[in-house]
Amino acid sequence: MGDGEPSLADVVQMLKTLSADVAGLKEKAASAESIHQDGQHHTDRPPRFQKLDFPRFDGKTDPLLFINRCESYFRQQRTMPEERVWMAFYNLEDISQFWFIQLQEDEGTPP
């Protein structure tokens, strides 16, 4: 090899360095793709199906706990807003179900 040309050992070292750089860039790209600016993980694909039981409410405990669990469920499952009231109603039990039926008769279905 003439002057200024890299030796075989130099080329091998450059390939190792290049390979490490590419691997590092792939790792950074994968991390950047899954983390949104707000710090939450997002992807273009829908979330994998996850079996979560919808909370049930019988009217005997604090309703705020039920509401918070419902909201968490809706966020996790990406439930459409127009489906949320129906899903919550469907999971009411005992006296809370009668209360909701009366509410619908008196004031209509809440938004």
Image (cartoon, rainbow, N blue to C red):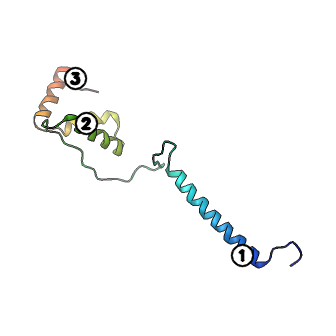
State yes or no: discs 2 and 1 in contact (Cβ < 8 Å).
no
Question: Is 3 positioned to the left or the right of 12 in the image?
Answer: right
**Residue wearing tag 2:** 67
Dot 1 alpha-carbon crowd within 10 angstroms: few under 14, some 14 to 19, many 20 or more = few
Q: Earlier in the sequence, mark 1 or mark 3?
A: 1
Question: Is 40 positioned to the left or the right of 94 in the image?
Answer: right
Instruction: Between residue 20 and residue 34, name the one nearer to us.
Output: 20
Amino acid type assigned to the residue bearing label 2 in the image: Ile
Name which residue lies at 30% across and 36% down: 83
Q: Quadrant of the N terminus?
A: bottom right
Instruction: Between residue 62 and residue 50, name the one nearer to us.
Output: 62
Residue 103 drawn at (x, y percent): 17, 25
Name which residue lies at 47% across and 49% down: 43
State yes or no: discs 1 and 3 in contact (Cβ < 8 Å).
no
Label 2 to label 1: alpha-carbon separation: 62 Å
Name which residue lies at 57% across and 56% down: 28
Give the SS element for disc 2: helix
**Residue wearing tag 3:** 108
Instruction: Between residue 15 and residue 94, name the one nearer to us.
Output: 15
Say how many tags the image has.
3
Name which residue lies at 68% across and 68% down: 17
**Residue wearing tag 1:** 12
Residue 74, quarter of picture? top left
Residue 63 drawn at (x, y percent): 20, 34
Amino acid type assigned to the residue bearing label 3 in the image: Gly
Q: Is the residue 58 above or below the residue 22 in the image?
A: above
State yes or no: discs 2 and 3 in contact (Cβ < 8 Å).
no
Residue 79, quarter of picture? top left
Q: Earlier in the sequence, mark 2 or mark 1?
A: 1
Q: Quadrant of the C terminus?
A: top left
Amino acid type assigned to the residue bearing label 1 in the image: Val
Label 1 to label 3: alpha-carbon separation: 75 Å
